[in-house]
Image (tube, rainbow, N blue to C red):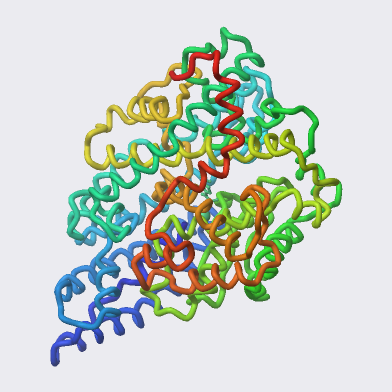
Amino acid sequence: MLKNLIIAVSLAGLVAPSAMAEKKETAKEFVARIQQESLELAKELEAAYWVRSNFITKDTAVLAAKAGERGLAFEASVVEQAKQFKDAKTDPVTARAIELMLRGSAAPAPTDPKLQAELAQILTDMEGQYGSGKYCNAAGQCRELQELEAVLAKSRDYDELLDVWQGWRTVSPAYRKTYQRFVELGNQGAKDSGFNDLADAWKSNYDMTSEEFTEEASRLWNQVKPFYSELQCHVRAKLSEQYGENKVPLDQPIPAHLLGNMWSQTWDNLYPLMEPHKGVASLDVTAALKEQGYDEKRMVETAEGFFTSLGLPELPDSFYENSLIKKPADRNVVCHASAWDLDNGNDPRIKQCVEITEEHLSTLHHELGHIYYYLMYKHQQPVFKGGAHDGFHEAIGDTIVLSMTPGYLKEKGLIEEVVESPEATLNKQMKLALEKIAFLPFGKMIDEWRWKVFSGEIAPQDYNKGWWDLRTEYQGIQAPVERTEKHFDAGAKYHIPGNTPYTRYFLSFIMQFQFHKSLCEKAGVEGPLHECSIYGNADAGKALGDMLALGQSKPWPDAMEALTGQRQMDASAIIDYFAPLNAWLKEQNKDRQCGW
Ligand code: X8Z
Ligand code: ZN
């Protein structure tokens, strides 16, 4: 999350007048100087942001905004300087470093110092408002996001769900205007850094042109769309049985509050309603974690244990000392899980308000995926510290989770028995598809919305309409009650006020199946992919570690090739993985009218 800001900032450097005055600096000297300066600045920024996210108060807002301002000033100055080396004749490593310095960050710095200050302030405020958001209902009961999410996950009471769904969306209208200003400032920063707009800047991070990237993302979406439509059709039919056809009509998009998740982004909480073969091979890991008295630390250690089983290093002691893994009772923190690369790779940390559930265990693996990337590219120079692209960074931990098969869970004592039968396979696939396939259109549409907002195609007065149009187009869902331009429903999702680009997750969800497939091949595991676990396999661990160690020193197709032998992102691995479920869904849907 913050990683990007830090990396963006760590690429930045103050103009050093002494270095400029005398003989002209070479490109290589320039890169070395900037990286040195960036390490100094990074220390200050990391400290300010970490403390801010751990204690949301008026005072930490001052510190974080000030630090952010310094970061943006730094970044603007580096971009300005790096431009003169853009086409310099130099060695390939230096050329790559310069190219990376000229890429767009999540919020590129405007050159005007006043605007830098305003942008830093806005980003701090929006994230703080999200992080401290609460919904108090008519009875005066106030709840935070995680409590509201728990209701969405468990309740099947239409009205209770609706209350909570609407309730969380009372927080975001407060920063709708702020977001509008952010768009102006972000676009200004993008223009000052040499891009058409902020969308163009975001799309500059993939070793291809912006246009090519837009095409590439659409191509991948079109690969998976037919499968998603089958899943949506089946889930709608089941929800219609549950809530009645008047509440869930069979020819309309699904009401968004019934999908078990605050943003309808993953639907695995609906598994009990969707289980194809009732009672076959229980997969209730949450119950086992609770029964066995897991606490937050043991949850983290369990995740670490998977990585070390692959021959990757143990986490440093400082990781456990400095991370935040338990929600503090008495203060506001940004609970949205994140991984941080502090002190130049020497003090990695996570921040997650861990709950003892299977979902949180998966998220912990996700976060440790980021941490292991940090550890493995620690030796790289700062400018090369980053994922091959941001989707790679997001995919590592999730790839590991794909190896948490019933066989693995049994070994860990988290399920009682491994049942091998076509029925058991379908159950397992349904549960995973409700997470992984349901997510794909959501992963795609978030930035579809932002790209249009940044380009002006969605005007400020249409933010909410534009949002729901895309929600319906991509996901086949709809708002359960009338929404107006007083609302700001996009802003109810962390990554909007947190300003984290989102296409990375869409790409990650596709690539993690490619990675899983290749790692299973390296591990020499035979049989279907959905039964493969690389747990304990050093060959797979070595292949993974080698790719991570590249950081972003090479264009991403090189990293992809190193691990998978392919130079492209490709959805055939995810489609093949789910072949049994896909066939079953088609059969279930054969007499239904699918589509919305
Ligand atoms: O934000 C995250 C991670 C941190 S990078 C917890 N994820 C996305 C989300 O929660 O919306 C992971 C999957 C999608
Ligand atoms: Zn992540």
Q: Quadrant of residue 390?
A: bottom left
* Image quadrant occupied by the C terminus: top left
| Front residue of this view, candidates 198 and 186 | 198
Q: Is residue 229 left or right of residue 354?
A: left
Q: Is residue 153 left or right of residue 83?
A: right
Instruction: Find residue 468 and report its horizontal and vertical position in percent.
Output: 39, 26
Taking 145 as reference, is 466 above or below it?
A: above
Question: Which residue is found at the position 36% from the left and 42% from the top?
Answer: 447
- Taking the image as drawn, is residue 472 in sight? yes
**What count of labels does the image hold?**
0
Taking 498 as reference, is 284 above or below it?
A: above
Instruction: Find residue 497 and report its horizontal and vertical position in percent.
Output: 42, 45
Q: Residue furthest bottom?
A: 23
Question: Which residue is found at the position 80% from the left and 46% from the top?
Answer: 418
| Front residue of this view, candidates 364 and 115 | 364
Instruction: Find residue 55 and report its horizontal and vertical position in percent.
Output: 56, 56
| Front residue of this view, candidates 536 and 285 | 536
Q: Is residue 121 left or right of residue 90?
A: right
Taking 215 as reference, is 592 above or below it?
A: above
Question: Which residue is found at the position 45% from the left and 46% from the top?
Answer: 571
Question: Which residue is found at the position 34% from the left and 80% from the top?
Answer: 37
| Front residue of this view, candidates 59 and 438 | 438
Instruction: Find residue 141 and report its horizontal and vertical position in percent.
Output: 66, 29
Q: Residue furthest top?
A: 246
- Taking the image as drawn, is residue 328 in sight? no
